[in-house]
Image: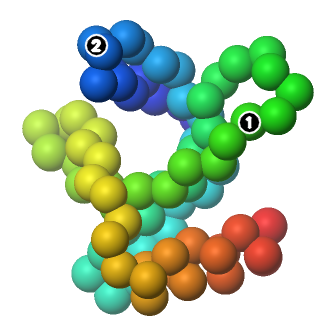
Amino acid sequence: MNFIVVDSNGNNIECDIIGLFSHEDKNFIIYTESSLEKEKDVHASLYKIENNKLKLFPILKSEDWDLVDKYLEKI
């Protein structure tokens, strides 16, 4: 599954979803850019779906990053 992110310069970047999970009232998405590069950066965000559109929000709490790390260890 993939989606498009618009970066700060207005460029559309296609991204692939690595995983989705929820904890308490938070939804997390882990993804990487869809590219032909050998090494890809893995990104994680909080997300909501509003009006059938995916909205991403930064992860600010270290406890939330710990949850992301635990999720990545399982896959």
**Residue depicted at x 35% and y 24%:** 7
Q: Residue furthest left?
A: 51
Q: Quadrant of the N terminus?
A: top right
Q: Nearer the viewer, residue 9 or 73?
A: 9
C-beta proximity under 8 Å, tags 2 and 1: no
Q: Residue furthest top?
A: 11
**Residue depicted at x 52% and y 20%:** 14
The location of residue 55, given as percent across then percent down, is 25, 44
Q: Quadrant of the C terminus?
A: bottom right
Q: Is residue 65 above or below residue 40?
A: below
Q: Say the numbered circle drawn on residue 71.
A: none
Q: Nearer the viewer, residue 41 or 29?
A: 41
Q: Nearer the viewer, residue 57 or 50?
A: 57
Q: Say the numbered circle drawn on residue 10.
A: 2
Q: Is residue 27 above or below residue 49?
A: below
The location of residue 72, given as percent across then percent down, is 71, 69
- Position of 24 with respect to 62 (left or right) is left
Q: Amino acid at mark 2?
A: Gly
Q: Amino acid at mark 1?
A: Lys
**Residue depicted at x 37% and y 11%:** 11
The location of residue 61, given as percent across then percent down, is 35, 80
Residue 53, located in which quarter of the rendered image? Answer: top left
Q: Secondary structure at mark 2?
A: loop
**Residue depicted at x 28% and y 13%:** 10
- Position of 50 with respect to 19 (left or right) is left
Between discs 2 and 1, the one toward the N terminus: 2
Residue 39, located in which quarter of the rendered image? Answer: top right
Q: Residue furthest front?
A: 9
Measure how far apart labels 2 and 1 are at the Cα level.
Answer: 21 Å
Q: Say the numbered circle drawn on residue 40.
A: 1
Q: Secondary structure at mark 1?
A: loop
